[in-house]
Image (cartoon, rainbow, N blue to C red):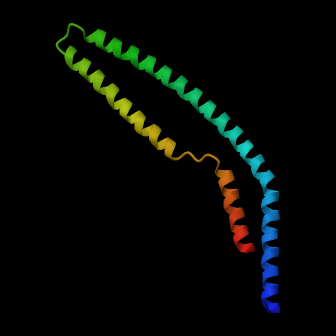
Amino acid sequence: MTLGSLTKARGRVRAWKAVGAFCAGRGGDYAELISLELADTKATLLREVIAMVALATGLLFALSFLCIALIATSFGTPHFIGIVWGVAGTWIVVSIAAFFVLRAQLRGASHFAALRSELCKDAQVIKEAL
């Protein structure tokens, strides 16, 4: 072994030691960040679910009574069958639209974004150190 290769090997060992110390020091930070992000995500999700359930329940009752009133008003008229099918079709369209809106909202959700960002930054620091 030459002196140059020995020095190069020691440098690599020092670099890996530094990376190991860096990762060990960041482990506690990651654990804390995960617990904070988990608590924040849980609280946000709970608020959103409660709000969605309340909104959905209110809208369903309002639309149900509106549809019943519309059907009852048209009872005995020549337009009764058309109105009943119109109400059913409207409910189907509203259900399909709600499905696509919910699907679009779920695609945009970014949970644990701060943790992901920190992990990417640290991976970049490690790559630069090596």
Which residue does the image show at 65% across and 48% down from the upper left?
Answer: 112
Residue in front for this viewpoint, 44 or 24: 24
Which residue does the image show at 82% across and 69% down from the upper left?
Answer: 18
Quarter of the C terminus within the rendering: bottom right
Horizontal side of 96 relative to 7 (left or right) equals: left
Where, by quadrant of the figure, is residue 5 drawn? bottom right
Horizontal side of 29 relative to 76 (left or right) equals: right
Residue 30 spot, x, y in % from top left: 75, 51
Horizontal side of 86 relative to 107 (left or right) equals: left
Which residue does the image show at 34% across and 25% down from the upper left?
Answer: 91
Residue 13 spot, x, y in % from top left: 80, 75
Where, by quadrant of the figure, is residue 45 drawn? top right
Which residue does the image show at 82% across and 75% down from the upper left?
Answer: 14
Q: Is residue 122 above or below residue 15?
A: above
Residue 40 spot, x, y in % from top left: 69, 39
Q: Is residue 77 above or below residue 22?
A: above
Q: Is residue 116 above or below residue 107?
A: below
Residue in front for this viewpoint, 34 or 45: 34
Where, by quadrant of the figure, is residue 3 drawn? bottom right
